Image (tube, rainbow, N blue to C red):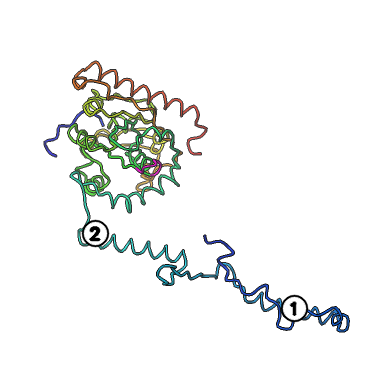
Amino acid sequence: MADAKVIPFDDDRSRGAAVQRPAARRRGAGSRRKSGGEQAAVREPAAVRESAVVREVQPLAGRIPAQEDVHVTRENPETGVKQPPHDEAGLERRVARGLAFLRRRLTGEYEVDDFGYDEELTDQVLMSLLRPVYEKYFRVDVKGIENIPAHGGALIVANHSGTLPLDGLMMQVAVHDRHPANRHLRLLAADLVFVLPVVNELARKLGHTLACAEDAERLLAQGELVGVMPEGFKGIGKPFGERYKLQRFGRGGFVSTALRQGVPIIPCSIVGAEEIYPMIGNAKTLARVLGIPYFPLTPTFPWLGPLGAVPLPTKWTIQFGEPILTDGYPPEAAEDPMLMFNLTDQVREQIQHTLYKLLVQRRSVFF
């Protein structure tokens, strides 16, 4: 990995079944039919008849338990073994899966790929942690998910913004949860991600890898869905006054990678991330001391301390555009600088145009 050449991406239970019906329709032991003569000879007073009805109804009402207190024990018709209620069985299955997951973690009986990607951990833990942020906090709307192929390699190219790279994570959840095939998005990340403690391990487990041509081509050749944000730090660290204005896309390294593998390029436009940390300043001297590309100054950070690091709850929209096909080009097309420039400009313009269209349609930043 250390020899990798970094390319300038810049980075039913029904109600009737639930209640065990007693003989609600049964007749009393003395309620046999009488002949017409007997009925005429024996006439009970009205009060006696009413009391009989009361005696018949009251015990029945008392024997019907409340709906929420009913627990139906079902019997498996094949084995004859009694099974617990549906909700209890579901809980037992979840507990069993959780215990099995912990056992595999403790014994090391799980798999990661050559890049460190842990699919089981991603599905069962990491996605579960990101999903509430995606659904409840940023309330992401997803459009054009049908433009992502159900199988095979593809390269998703998106705009980058928000001071911290939360947009990449939300795009990853959107692809996994909204795509019919529940595909996993493998993001290409800057080298800074892989030198930070904890962040490095989590990024690898989530399937992220270094933004270099070799890694990107290997993933695409394996039929993976790869995501890249060519603006890199220039996009994520731009001032608030330049929001939704795409920065330079580098030299088009992502286009060259797509051409070599013959995979479609899918433009992606993300609206809402620009406002989570409105960057009104950049402490460049402090950034150089810390060895980071920029040190953001926002209306809340660093003035409010750790509380200032909480992103604003903006409303997001992620739209995947129509794919730009590359399989019709000859192999040598990847070395044609003019073709790469034209395709890069086409992708950039499509993303920018969609951003403007989504901004016009947006009624509020937060709602």
Between 322 and 327, the residue placed more toward the observer is: 327
Q: Position of residue 336 (x, y in %)?
A: 20, 17
Name the side, left or right, on which 215 lies relative to 162: left
Name the side, left or right, on which 30 lies relative to 356: right
- Asked which secondary structure carries label 1, the reply is helix
Q: Looking at the image, is 79 positioned above or below residue 290?
A: below
Q: Callout 1: few (<14), some (14-19), or many (20+) C-alpha neighbours within 10 Å?
A: few
- Asked which secondary structure carries label 2, the reply is helix
- Look at the image and tell me whether residue 262 can be seen: yes
According to the image, label 1 marks what residue? 54
Between 336 and 325, the residue placed more toward the observer is: 325
Front of the two marks 1 and 2? 1
Pick out the residue farthest to the right: 40
Q: Amino acid at mark 2?
A: Arg
Q: Give the distance between the C-alpha atoms of the residues marked 1 and 2, in whole angstroms.
A: 63 Å
Q: Which mark is residue 105?
A: 2
Residue at 71% x, 78% y: name it: 56
Q: Looking at the image, is 7 positioned above or below residue 194?
A: above
Residue at 20% x, 42% y: name it: 194
Q: Which mark is residue 242?
A: none
Determine the image quadrant of residue 151.
top left
Q: Which residues are magenta?
A: 177-182
| Residue 179 on the magenta span | yes
Q: Position of residue 177 (x, y in %)?
A: 39, 44
* Prevailing SS of the magenta stretch: loop
Residue at 75% x, 80% y: name it: 32
| Residue 57 on the magenta span | no
